[in-house]
Image (cartoon, helix red, strand yellow):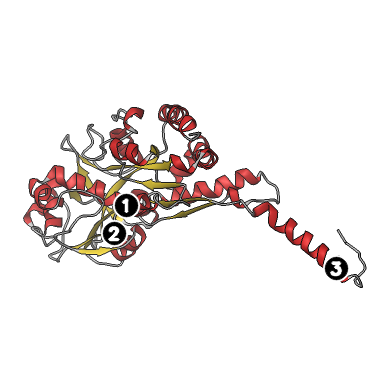
Amino acid sequence: MLLSFDVVNGRGLVAVVAVIGMLAVVPVVNAEPIRGAGSTFAAPIIQQWSSDYQESRTDGGDFTSLEWRVDYEPIGSLAGVMRLDQPEMDFAATDTPLASEDLKKRNLAQFPVVMGGIVVTTIIAGVRPGQLRLSGPVLADIYLGKITRWSDPALKAINPDISLPDANIAVLHREDGSGSTAAFTSFLSKMSSQWKDQVGSGALVKWPNGRGEKGTGGLANIAAATDNSITYLEYGQAIRLGMSYACLQNQSGAFIKPDVKSFQAGLANIAWDPANAFQADTTNLAGADAYSIAVVTYAIIPIKIGRDRVDRVLDLFRLALSEGAGKATALGYISVSADLAAKIEAYWANKLSASANN
């Protein structure tokens, strides 16, 4: 549209410019993106869902709004939860659920959004994906520094059919607060009393051995570039990078290959309780075909941010749970089941809709 006016009238020109400026500013004065931070494990699928959310709200049109954008920062589960104290944060994503007491004290809501598994990856010449076998006690001894070479008799005993090199094991781990670390160390604590007593479990532990790296991406990159290395990574990431992984011995004594089916076999036995904010123990999972270490990523929302902001976060995750399963599977995750999604919707209605109004 063209506007014509008398340029001699300077005051008229200033007024028109001012009006145009106001019109350009008004639509975005109160517009803010949905802001989240936390899990690096779930970062790929959250970023995919964020893109899908913006596309869905645009609905094929040319107009877009800052309110339809999601700014998600993958800084680790522990750091993400800590960020919730900042007033601009709308949600955190964590692979380590908060206890009910903490949620109540901080006025937070918590629910699962996606699942997956932690796999042990190795770079050993001549050893193919799924060929190496590891038991929990042997894995704990590697990370304790008691087993230092791939030719150790304990490794040869459970791997009689493959040739392991007489080389030092390069032990790698996360050095920042991580839900993946919490799951991995929880498993080691159940497999080794020495690990439990000396190191314990948590998102951040004092490692007795090995080299640390920040972020799951950083850990993956250094692992892929280090011969004779061992570490733990999110399953989808390991597959996308073409990294070799080990079969892990489960409760039944079987050495199980990590894949979506074996993760589901273990997760299927979990009883999800909304009254307990859906908390679940996902390590050393039971089941003849179950892989031992699964991970659940939870969204945590500060109720105090108000109804409008809470509803926007729920809008994002409602779309993710209802239409995002295919994208999750493609990236190596396990989507929330229809039954669990229904429980989550009921939890939102009971916990969030009423509370957010207060």
Q: Residues within 10 Å of mark 1 (few under 14, many from 20)?
A: many
* Left or right relative to 13: residue 321: left
Front one among 325 and 341: 341
Which residue, as the protein is rendered here, is positioned at the far front? Answer: 11
Check disc 1 and report its element: helix, strand or loop: helix
Residue 176: which disc? 2
Marks 1/3: CA distance? 57 Å
Front one among 254 and 125: 254
Residue 285 is situated, as x and y percent measured from the top left of the image, at 23, 36
Q: Residues within 10 Å of mark 3 (few under 14, many from 20)?
A: few
Residue 168: which disc? none
What amino acid type is highlighted by mark number 3? Arg
Nearest to N terminus: mark 1 or mark 2:
1
Q: Give the residue at mark 1.
A: 78
Residue 80 is situated, as x and y percent measured from the top left of the image, at 37, 52
Marks 2/3: CA distance? 59 Å
What amino acid type is highlighted by mark number 2? Asp
